[in-house]
Structure formats: C-alpha cells, structure tokens
Image: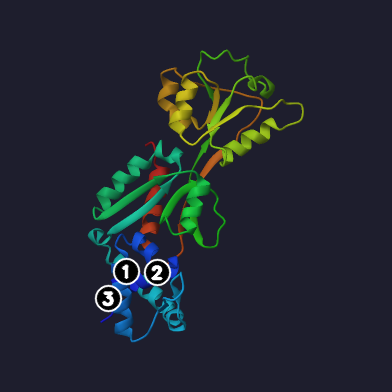
C-alpha cells in the first residue's frame, strides 16, 4: 500500500530538485528521504529518479507519475478540509513577514492560529519584500505577508491591508513651518526602510526632482532602529504612523506635513500554488480577517 508520507516526499524531491533540500523542507534527514523514495520505488516497481546527476532528475516514469502524486496530495488536503476538524490541521507553516506587520497585528494572528489550530506550528521569518518573494518562489516559505500587489503566475495572492507613510520627527528637531519644503528637509538625514524597498525608491524619486539638492537617505532593515534614530533626533523618518501610535500619543514623536505626497504601503498575503497549499490558504484567509478587524 502506497504511504502518503512517501508520496509527499516524492513530490518535494521533484519540486526542489534534490534529496537534501527535501529533507530540510520536511524536517527530516537525507537518509530518511532516500529510504522513503526507495520504498516508494519498490512498491511501484519503477525507478522515479536518475541518481547519476547532481540534481535528483526525474526519470520518464517519474515524470508520468508526478502529476498523479500531486493529485493524491490535493485530494488528501480537500478531505481534511471537508472534515473540518481543527485537530486534523497539523504541520509546520513557514511564514515570511514584512516588519510593518510585526509591529501591527501579527501577534493577534498567532494567537488566533494557536486557538483555532492547536496542532499547527509556525516558523516566522522577518525580511524585506524582495527576499520574501524570492523565498516563496524557491519554496523556502509556505506563505508571506509582503508589499504587493504580487503579479507572479506561480503565486496566489490576496490583499491584506494598507498603511499610509508619513513624515515623522521628534518635536525637538528645529523644522521650518509646515508644510515643510523638500529642499529644507534635505538638511537632515531621511531615515526609512532599507535600500531594496518600495518606500526607499519612492523617497529617492522625490528628491531626484529638478532643482533639489541630493538628500542623505539612511536606509535601515530594522523599523525598531528607524524609530530609535528618529527619537534621538538624528533626522526625520518616513514610516507608517500606525507603528508608532504610542510615541505619537505621548508626544515623543510627531507627524508633520511636507509639500510632497507619500505612497501607501499595500500588503498582500501570497503563497505558492501547489497541491499541499491548503494550510497556507487557511492562514491567508485568517490573516485577511485579523487585518480587517485590527485594532478593534
């Protein structure tokens, strides 16, 4: 009788192109992966992989059977979903998150997941969108909350939330009267997200206008550090006010107006389209609900 674990292993070795990568994905050892594939080959009476290549290349028979194996995993996922038993939702979800989400409703989502699906485990990785997208396409993440929209045929995405950016400074910084001109802002460092992000590119484009001098952009991959540098009066920052509500309320930071508009940060939940994506789809649907009701 064909074991589902062996079928799942077959699909992941084929998808990731190697026994080692599949072992990492399935949280087991490479010998265990080899044993499962050998068992499946023995049960089916066929050779699934050509082991003479550096990558685990599928044989012709392996190619013929891969689609059937993926269908088996899809049917199993649909059966679990129809059964609707929360205890049956088990496994590990590798979740990638943009840091703005960490500072807003991520904790509430984790609480809801733990309550609804106690057998589900989470591995959370915080990074910038460009790296999260790459990790999704490389199957290193199951789902990611990142800046969108995501136009990628291999990924399914849905809108999550949108937060406006704003100019922020400590009240002690001697800013000119509002609205502050961009040319005046160039006197201070502009502290914001790291270089390979949409906000950084948007700010850079603002200061590339004719007649403006070059601005000093201090890109940072840590929002906590951006907030700290702003509190210390090193410069002005461009961040979503939603992540600094406490600092604004107690008067340590203030939002000020500038004669230039800033974009909103629109986030999406994205995950790879594959037979075992039901867990990721469940997390995405719950995230949409949590984001819509935050901070209520």
In the image, residue 31 sits, relative to residue 49, either above or below, namely above
Tell me the residue at 42%/77% (across/down).
66
Nearest to the observer: residue 183 or residue 63: 63
Q: Secondary structure at mark 3?
A: loop
Spatial separation of the CA atoms under disc 3 and disc 1: 13 Å
- Of labels 3 and 1, earlier in sequence is 3
Foreground disc of the pair 3, 2: 2
**Label of residue 33 in the image:** 1
Foreground disc of the pair 3, 1: 1
- Of labels 1 and 2, earlier in sequence is 2
Question: Label 2: few (<14), some or many (≥20) within 10 Å?
Answer: many
- Of labels 3 and 2, earlier in sequence is 3
Q: Looking at the picture, how far across and down is residue 269, in whole percent?
A: 46, 51
Snapshot quadrant of residue 215: top right
Spatial separation of the CA atoms under disc 3 and disc 2: 16 Å
Residues at circles 1 and 2 in contact by the CB criterion of under 8 Å: yes
Spatial separation of the CA atoms under disc 1 and disc 2: 8 Å
Quadrant location of the C terminus in the rendered image = top left
Please give the residue where the numbered disc 2 appears in the rendered image.
Answer: 13
Q: Is residue 2 visible?
A: yes
Question: Label 3: few (<14), some or many (≥20) within 10 Å?
Answer: few
Q: Is residue 268 visible?
A: no
């Amino acid at each position: 009788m064909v074991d589902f674990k062996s079928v799942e292993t077959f699909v992941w070795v084929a998808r990731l192109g190697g026994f080692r990568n599949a072992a990492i994905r399935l949280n087991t050892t490479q010998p265990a992966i080899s044993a499962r594939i050998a068992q499946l080959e023995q049960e089916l009476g066929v050779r699934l992989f050509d082991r003479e290549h550096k990558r685990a290349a599928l044989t012709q028979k392996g190619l013929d059977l891969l689609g059937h194996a993926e269908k088996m995993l899809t049917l199993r996922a649909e059966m679990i979903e129809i059964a609707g038993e929360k205890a049956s939702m088990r496994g590990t979800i590798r979740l990638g998150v943009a840091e703005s989400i960490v500072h807003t409703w991520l904790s509430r989502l984790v609480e809801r997941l733990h309550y609804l699906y106690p057998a589900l485990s989470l591995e959370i990785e915080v990074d910038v969108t460009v790296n999260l997208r790459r990790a999704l396409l490389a199957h290193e993440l199951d789902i990611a909350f990142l800046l969108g929209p995501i136009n990628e045929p291999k990924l399914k995405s849905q809108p999550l939330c949108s937060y406006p950016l704003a100019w922020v400074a400590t009240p002690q910084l001697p800013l000119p009267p509002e609205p502050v001109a961009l040319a005046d802002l160039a006197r201070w460092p502009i502290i914001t997200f790291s270089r390979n992000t949409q906000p950084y590119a948007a700010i850079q484009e603002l200061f590339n206008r004719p007649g403006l001098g070059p601005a000093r952009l201090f890109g940072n991959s840590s929002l906590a550090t951006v907030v700290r540098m702003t509190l210390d009066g090193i410069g002005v920052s461009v961040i979503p006010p939603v992540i600094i509500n406490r600092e604004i309320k107690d008067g340590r930071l203030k939002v000020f107006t500038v004669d230039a508009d800033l974009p909103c940060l629109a986030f999406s939940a994205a995950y790879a389209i594959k037979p075992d994506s039901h867990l990721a789809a469940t997390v995405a649907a719950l995230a949409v609900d949590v984001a819509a009701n935050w901070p209520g």
